[in-house]
Image (tube, rainbow, N blue to C red):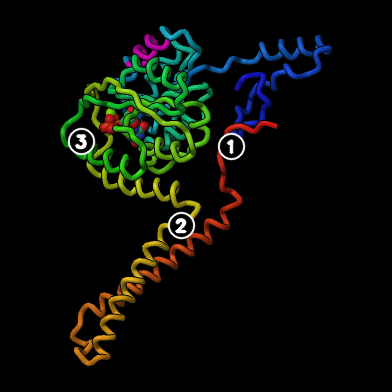
Amino acid sequence: MTDQTPEFPEPQQRPEAPPAPAQQQNQQRRPQQQRTQQHRDNQPQWPDLSVVIPLYNEEESLKELHAQLRAALSRMNIRYELLFIDDGSTDRSFQVLRDLKRTDKHIKIVRFRRNYGKSAALSVGFEKAQGNIVVTLDADLQDDPAEIPSLKKRIDDGLDLVSGWKKKRKDPISKTIPSRFFNFVTARLTGIRIHDFNCGLKAYRREVVKTVKVYGELHRYVPVLAHWEGFKVGEVVVQHRARRFGKSKYGIGRFWRGFLDLLTALFTTRYLRRPLHLFGVWGLVAVTAGVLIDGWLAIEWYLGRTSLSNRPLFLGGILLIIVGIQFISIGLLGEMISKTRAAETEYQIRDFIK
Ligand code: UDP
Ligand code: MG
């Protein structure tokens, strides 16, 4: 936001935000203005970029990761912070981080009391991040910090969220094949044309991380949620590296949970406001099909061709009618819930010019 645009407070403004610029105030009150200016200069400077790094038992990787981050970021000549979120590690990760912090004032550490999962770690990271751009990165050295400038460039060029695309994946095949399928289905169902939803390396404009709510295991769907809120989502090809230390924290179970989370993501974005549009349509289809089938059977019976007792389809028709009515009822219940929640439903306002 430039100083000249009329401002409307962002919903989640930095709590310690410096006072609004004094530019539009009366030009004659110079001393006051000067003082305001001085006051602003005394405020700590907000970082341009925050790197959020969720980690769970990654003690061997951290030192090198930090060195690589530092090398990449110092070349960029910007103010930055490194926000490590220790998701309840049981190894020495936290001690390693604390030692690193002594050598580098950019480091901030959040430590969870227990393991809550990557989504929780990202969510807290997003809340604490102060930079204008927020980059997320896995802690296991699979993502290359040297990619940060190219992600940042896409944001500077106008995207709100840039997702990395691990075009050449360095993972076992048991992971890459299900992952392809998963990405294909997700892209199809959500209409977002990106190839790699689950890449740890992403960059966000500040508004995105302060708007999108990540919980459960929804971190894979941040692009979906952001797209739904009206943010511009894009991708950039990134290098991927094999895991050198430790092991992956996810097994095959992630795909089942992943799909359930996809349902949640679709449901809470597309149909959150009109649940009847989803359930009602299918309910009506089922009821209509059931009524047609049973009506036809009833006419045949009436004309005396067959008795209903040896028409199994009759039961099928009844089932369709019952299921259809259930669907419509669920849709209506959903509407009632969404109506009572309407007050807290937020619409994303981009600008408000008076
Ligand atoms: N991670 C986390 N909490 C968890 C599981 C994983 O913070 O409960 C972190 C992990 O330390 C790593 C990132 O999330 O930095 C990605 O995890 P992993 O490398 O195991 O996933 P994969 O690369 O296999 O998709
Ligand atoms: Mg990994």
Q: Secondary structure at mark 2?
A: helix
Q: Is residue 299 visible?
A: yes
Mark 2, residue position? 275
Q: Which residues are magenta?
A: 65-73
Three-letter residue code for mark 2: Pro
Q: Is mark 1 within 8 Å of ligand 1?
A: no
- Residue 290: quadrant of the picture: bottom left
Q: Which label was assigned to residue 349?
A: 1
Residue 54 vs residue 105: left or right?
Answer: left
Task: State which mark lies toward you, 1 or 3.
Answer: 1
First in sequence: mark 1 or mark 3?
Answer: 3
Q: Is ligand 1 less than 8 Å from the beta carbon at label 3?
A: yes
Q: Is residue 69 magenta?
A: yes
| Residue ID at (33%, 26%) | 164
**Residue 234, quarter of picture:** top left
Reply above or below: 78 against 306.
above
Instruction: Assign the N terminus to one quadrant of the image.
Output: top right
Quadrant housing the C terminus: top right
Q: Secondary structure at mark 3?
A: helix
Judged from the image, the secondary structure of the residue bearing numbered disc 1 is loop
- Please state the horizontal and vertical placement of residue 10, each as a whole percent of the image: 61, 31
Viewer-nearest of labels 3 and 2?
2
